[in-house]
Image (cartoon, rainbow, N blue to C red):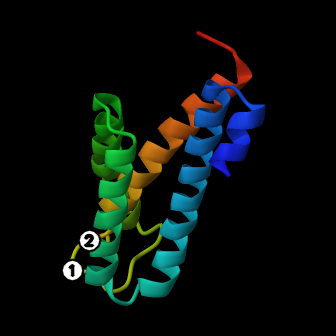
């Protein structure tokens, strides 16, 4: 598919589309694994570790690591506040949130960053 895209698209457009597809597939994997493995949180945690490592390697940059870390910390922090206020609750957890949740937030943060930048590259709009 990437070879076909290179025939019709510039390298910037091809790279942007590739990043969008990787992030969409990663999001699908994230959601699919949560639906399948929510009752086995440790297995889900290690599955998310693998996905996190893949994305951090694929999009290796200081900013991707920073986005991951921000999502990893602030996402669950927001969850702690809302769960402690009774908005919802989680099952199969020893804390206010499941052990895999910080990784899910980190993965989401990397994908949002990459997709936003890719869409910006495709649009040709600069700050």
Q: Quadrant of residue 119?
A: top right
Residue 77: x and y in percent read 31, 52
Q: Which residue is depicted at the point 66% across and 45% down?
A: 3
Q: Which residue is depicted at the point 65% across and 40% down?
A: 17
Say few, some or many: other residues with alpha carbon within 10 Å of mark 1 (under 14 / 14 to 19 / 20 or more). Answer: few
Q: Which residue is mark 1?
A: 94
Q: Is residue 69 something one can see in this rendering? A: yes
- Can you say whether 42 is above or below 97 in the image? below
Say few, some or many: other residues with alpha carbon within 10 Å of mark 2 (under 14 / 14 to 19 / 20 or more). Answer: some
Point out which mark residue 61 bears.
none
- Can you say whether 72 is above or below 126 in the image? below
Q: CA distance from mark 2 to mark 1?
A: 8 Å
Residue 59: x and y in percent read 39, 40
Name the element at disc 1: loop
Q: Which residue is mark 2?
A: 99
Q: Are marks 2 and 1 in contact (CB under 8 Å)?
A: yes
Q: Quadrant of residue 53?
A: bottom left
């Amino acid at each position: 598919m990437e070879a076909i895209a290179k025939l019709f698209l510039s390298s910037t457009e091809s790279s942007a589309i590739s990043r969008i597809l990787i992030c969409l597939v990663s999001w699908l994997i994230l959601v699919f694994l949560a639906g399948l493995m929510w009752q086995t949180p440790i297995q889900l945690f290690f599955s998310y570790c693998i996905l996190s490592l893949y994305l951090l390697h694929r999009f290796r940059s200081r900013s991707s690591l920073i986005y991951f870390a921000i999502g990893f910390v602030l996402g669950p922090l927001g969850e702690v506040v809302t769960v402690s206020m009774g908005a919802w609750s989680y099952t199969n957890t020893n804390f206010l949130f499941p052990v895999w949740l910080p990784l899910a937030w980190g993965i989401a943060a990397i994908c949002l960053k990459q997709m936003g930048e890719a869409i910006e590259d495709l649009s040709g709009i600069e700050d």
